[in-house]
Amino acid sequence: MIPFDDRDGLIWLDGQLVPWRQAKLHVLTHGLHYGSGVFEGERVYDGHVFREHDHAIRLQKSAEILDFQIPFSLEQMAQGVQELIQQNNIPNGYLRRLAWRGSEMIGVSAQNTRIHLAMAVWEWPSYFPPELLQQGIRLTTSDWVCPPPNAMPIASKAVGNYMIRTLSKHKAERLGYTDALLLDWRGYLAEATGANLFLLMDGALHTPTPDCFLNGITRQTVMALARRRGIEVVERHIAPSELAKAAEVFLTGTAAEVTPVGRIDDHSFAVGAVTRQLMADYQALVRGGDDALVI
Ligand code: PMP
């Protein structure tokens, strides 16, 4: 495993491309001490970032929810992304942007901190081990729950929202599972640690209402793809007991794309025709550069 701070290439930092190993920050950085950071994960397909504009807007909104503004325009970011992909020569990969509060103040109040933005791209073919995809990945339910929207800034892709997700995934991995499934604070099914959840029941796709976790860009895309195929899509609160009625289950996310789930605790699911169709439709869409699909 090559550590992420010891690679070749260039990183876009506060408006400039800098050598990868020099993209550093000081230990007394507000974002590191107080979780005042937001980020995006995007995929590059054939030199083109899928839904770059939507990701850039979500980054701005995530920052606004954390009470700061990204100091670069959508155009500046889009241009930086293109330079980054070209200069690093990564036509297929994963793009990460991160914005955070700097070192001017260390304390709970951070009104006068400078906001920084970094963007990096690297090759990352598969989020889950590819050999698991034939049978579907295995999830176990976490003890952690997605908190209510007045307990955490859940609509922001904020770094602090990932504490419970890392803890959930560590425990699941220790138990031999691929990932964890989080319920929400009311006990409904919510999502995996970095991807949204879909269940096929009686021919319709059911997906939890994203009222206390991220409404993923991939989730919205896959809902549109399913509807285009004439599949009914239902957003609602789903009880864990309903897993017994699900024929197919899959996850969606920028990194995860469409990933079949073969097992959740004691429930098993087939990697069936609908999942396979949507996996293929998603690949065709992202490779075709069809950002125009209405979501
Ligand atoms: N939920 C969480 C917690 C995530 O980290 C992600 C990945 N960003 C998603 C859902 C899926 O979001 P998207 O489809 O926008 O990548």
Image (tube, rainbow, N blue to C red):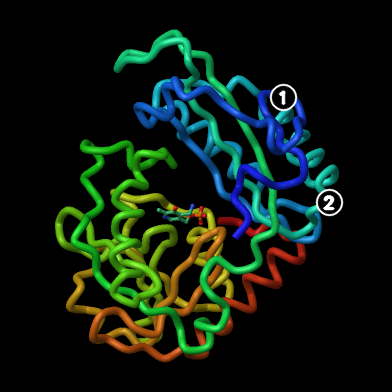
Q: Which residue is mark 1?
A: 15
- Whether residues under marks 2 and 1 lie with C-beta atoms below 8 angstroms apart, the answer is no
- In the rendered view, does 4 fall on the left or right side of 111? right
On screen, 7 above or below 72? below
Q: Give the structural element (helix, strand or loop) at label 2.
A: loop
* Residue type, label 2: Asn
Q: Residue at x 29, y 60 (%)?
A: 168
Q: Give the structural element (helix, strand or loop) at label 1.
A: loop
* Residue type, label 1: Gly
Few, some or many C-alpha atoms within 10 Å of disc 2 (few <14, some 14-19, many ≥20)? Answer: some
Q: Position of residue 65 (x, y in %)?
A: 40, 29
Q: Residue at x 75, y 60 (%)?
A: 92
Q: Which residue is mark 2?
A: 89
- In the rendered view, does 251 fall on the left or right side of 265? right
Displayed quadrant of residue 206: bottom left
Q: Position of residue 217 (x, y in %)?
A: 52, 54
Few, some or many C-alpha atoms within 10 Å of disc 1 (few <14, some 14-19, many ≥20)? Answer: some
Displayed quadrant of residue 194: bottom left
Q: How many marks?
A: 2
On screen, 176 above or below 135? above
Mark on residue 257? none
Q: Residue at x 37, y 27 (%)?
A: 33
N-terminal of the two: label 2 or label 1? 1
Q: Quadrant of the N terminus?
A: bottom right
Q: Position of residue 46 (x, y in %)?
A: 80, 60
Q: Residue at x 77, y 43 (%)?
A: 9
Residues at marks 2 and 1, CA–CA distance in whole angstroms: 19 Å
Q: Quadrant of the C terminus?
A: bottom right
